[in-house]
Image (spheres, grey):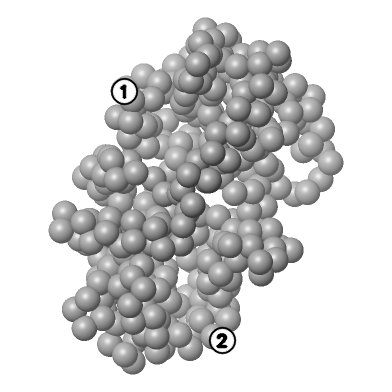
Amino acid sequence: MIVREVREEEKTAYNKAVSHVIQSWEWGEFRRKMGLDLVRLGHFESNNLSCAYQLTFHPVPFFKYSIGYLPKGPMPDEKMVEALKTLGQKKNVAFIKIEPNVISDKSKVISDKFRNLGLVQSKKSLFTKYNFLIDLTKTEEQLLAAMHPKTRYNIGIAQKKGVEVYESTKEEDFEIYLKLYFETTKRQKYFGHTSSYHKLVWQTLAPVKMARLLIAKYQGEPLVAWMLLNFASTLYYPYGGSSKEYKDVMASNLIAWEAIRLGKKMGLKVFDMWGALAPDAKESNPWYGFHRFKAGYGPAHVEYVGTYDLILKPALYNTLNIADKLRWIYLRTRHR
């Protein structure tokens, strides 16, 4: 087996080898436009690409080192860890954070595998460990039957009230989406991506039909806007925003149902709701309301294997984690 960087002309084979939109070739190009150093590696057997993944490198302020991040990639093996160590040394990396797109079977075997590869459980994850997935191969009747009765009721209210949901890739609708997104981050007091981040996602993925918007309007006023991404057989709901007006017309419930219907219309098999809380989540959690909203659609609640670090500079590892923790405390305090 040979491990090397994947070439431009191997883009199609690369996309067939990866399993998540974050690992897609197009997402990698978006990350490069953000100014990040990105490398795509492929495992080749007899010139056939059997495994592929991409990772980015992020400079650490005040240090001459960087941190690698490999999100939603394959399950690590010895060959992958060996390749990452070689690349990390070349890039002067302190550690590489690895978050496989692999659902856990909760067995001790998986934990032992990470430990045997020299990986340690990370002190911080970037994606949530849990997620909600909806099976789009089911009929609409089956999907509706699986929902919480209150969710079905709210969808009916929105329909009766005359809420309209439409799909768009128009720039004027993207501006509506941005406005509602930042209204929401301000109202709910959480950190969102910057305007330039969203614009680059849109400008990179929309032209290749990997991004689209759903807008919900009531009496001509936009109330909810979602950006949906699609890759391979999956539709993703990563970003959205809503107005504080006309909450009683349940526009958010209808837009979620229309997203599910859109995924079916596109011939996709899974609707990925981009994160969930743990099964024992408390109502005091600030994200509990959003978790409960998603749960109302009857999705499968899944747990991934988790986040692990490949440490290349042991003496720096704890220092950088403490510095990152202090940085986020400062940012949250300033934000409040």
On the question of residue 63 being in view, the answer is yes
Within the image, what quadrant is residue 200 found in? top left
- Residue nearest the viewer, comparing 119 with 176: 176
* Amino acid of disc 1: Glu
Residue 329 drawn at (x, y percent) = 58, 41
Q: Which mark is residue 201?
A: none
**Disc 2 versus disc 1: distance between alpha carbons?**
50 Å
- The image quadrant of residue 97 is top right
* Residue sticking out furthest to the right: 108
146 relative position to 114: left or right: left
- Residue drawn 48% across and 65% down? 136
Name the disc covering residue 9, or none: 1
The residue under the point 66% across, 69% down is 283
Mark 2 = which residue?
149
Is residue 317 depicted above or below 210 in this figure?
above
Front: mark 2 or 1: 2
> How many residues crowd around disc 1 within 10 Å: few (fewer than 14), some, or many (20 or more)?
few
**Camera-side residue: 263 or 184?**
184
Relative placement, left or right, of 49 versus 95 is: left
